[in-house]
Image (tube, rainbow, N blue to C red):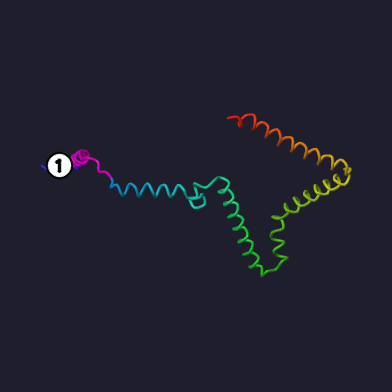
Amino acid sequence: MKPSPEDLEKIIHQTLRSLPPRRAPHSLQSRVLAALEARASLPWWKQSFAQWPLTARVAFFVGAAGIAKLAIMATIWAMAGFDGAQFTSAFSTQFAWIQTVSAIVDGFGDFCGALYRNIPPLWLYGGLAFVGTMYVALFGLAATAYRTLYANR
């Protein structure tokens, strides 16, 4: 009588389970451990992308999107025959936010300049002296605290 495939599978499974587990050669084990240690000691930019820090991955995606955008813009500009007017009209709405941000930064810079011009020089020098004095006091307090807490040990 011929055994069924299920019975044959059970027999083979029991036979293989009864065999003792094989140990890896010592040289293989040491080589694998050395390779794992070498991989773990690599800097983050040489490891897989999933091991990169989150900020680096985000920066990579932003940079890649920027490069893709520049490639698309260059292609459109080349297809327009390198005509600056057509290029400007095609991308003027996409760069409108840059003009808005530039106007805000210019306005803030003008405000800070006017504020600086209206502060008396004596107040500026006095503020600078106050900040310097506080820095020296903080340094002195830190040195005193260190000597008190750790120098006697």
- Which quadrant of the structure image shows residue 143? top right
Left-right relation of 94 to 10: right
- Closest to the observer, 141 or 77: 141
Q: Does the magenta stretch mainly form a helix, a strand or a loop?
A: helix
Quadrant position of the N terminus in the picture: top left
Numbered range of the magenta stretch: 7-23
- Residue that protrudes farthest toward the front in the picture: 152
Report the number of discs: 1
Residue type, numbered disc 1: Pro
Q: Which residue is mark 1?
A: 3
The x, y position of residue 36, in whole percent, is: 40, 47
The residue nearer to you, when weighing 68 against 2, is 68
Which quadrant holds the C terminus?
A: top right
Q: Nearer the viewer, residue 88 or 56?
A: 56
Q: Helix or strand or loop: what does disc 1 sit on?
A: loop
Whether residue 82 appears in magenta in the rendering, the answer is: no
Picture residue at 50% right of the left edge, 50% below the top: 43
Q: Is residue 17 magenta?
A: yes
Using residue 134 as the reference point, say whether residue 69 is left or right of it. left
Return the x and y of residue 30 as percentages of the image width and height.
34, 47
Identify the residue shown where x is 58% and y is 46%: 55
Above or below 24: residue 72: below
Residue furthest left as drawn: 1
Residue 59 x/y as whole percent: 59, 50
Q: Residue furthest bottom?
A: 81
From the top left corner, tell me how far across and down residue 126 is, in percent.
84, 40
* Residue under the point 51% across and 49% down: 44
Image side of residue 25 versus residue 144, left or right: left
